[in-house]
Amino acid sequence: MKYVHRFRVRAGREAVATFHSSAASLKAITPPPIVMRVHAAPAHLGEGDTMDFTMWLGPIPARWVARIEDVSEAGFVDRQISGPFGAWVHRHTFQPVDELTTDVLDEVTAELHPALGWKLIGLGMWLGLPILFAFRGWKTRRILEK
């Protein structure tokens, strides 16, 4: 399965990359009613770092551990090490339009978990990606364009 989302923010690539490398940003751009709790993560994510968190989808907790890979000024990848999907790779790409504008491209490839319960949860999460990423784009612009 593959999902792609793109949005533009009036902020330079460095500011966008710095924002996305902050572990606190993930919680800040997660839409309600999803509740996120970070268990362990460095303040600023770098190559090889892991982020351990739980996303509460209503009464259902989805524990997730992601590893950060391929870090550069142009973006990074977060790869699920354990969690609700059989596989999950999310590439964040920051493409400068000019010095004060950046396009953010999110590309997610995933496979559903083989266990039926997680497969159903993963399918529900996958179907919700357009809403999740629309909120993330809106919230990122709201934070960075102040």
Image (cartoon, grey):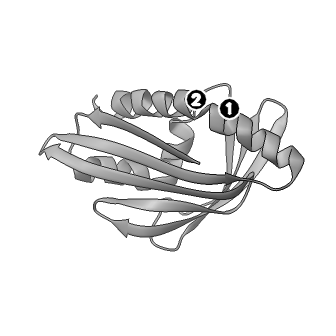
Residue 82 rendering spot, x and y as whole percentages: 72, 62
Q: Is residue 7 above or below residue 114?
A: above
Between 8 and 89, the one nearer to me in the picture: 89
97 displayed left or right of 49: left
Secondary element type, mark 1: loop
Residue 50 rendering spot, x and y as whole percentages: 59, 66
7 displayed left or right of 1: left
Residue under pointer 1: 34
Secondary element type, mark 2: loop
Q: Which mark is residue 140?
A: none
Residue under pointer 2: 31
102 displayed left or right of 20: left
Using a 10 Å C-alpha cutoff, classify the residue at mark 1 as few (fewer than 14 neighbours), some (14 to 19) or many (20 or more). Answer: some
Residue 57 rendering spot, x and y as whole percentages: 75, 34
Tally of numbered discs: 2
Looking at this rendering, what residue extends furthest in the front direction?
Answer: 1
Between 120 and 134, the one nearer to me in the picture: 120
At a point 47% along the width and 61% down the height, the residue shown is 77
At a point 77% along the width and 54% down the height, the residue shown is 113
Q: Is residue 75 above or below residue 134?
A: below
Between 52 and 96, the one nearer to me in the picture: 96
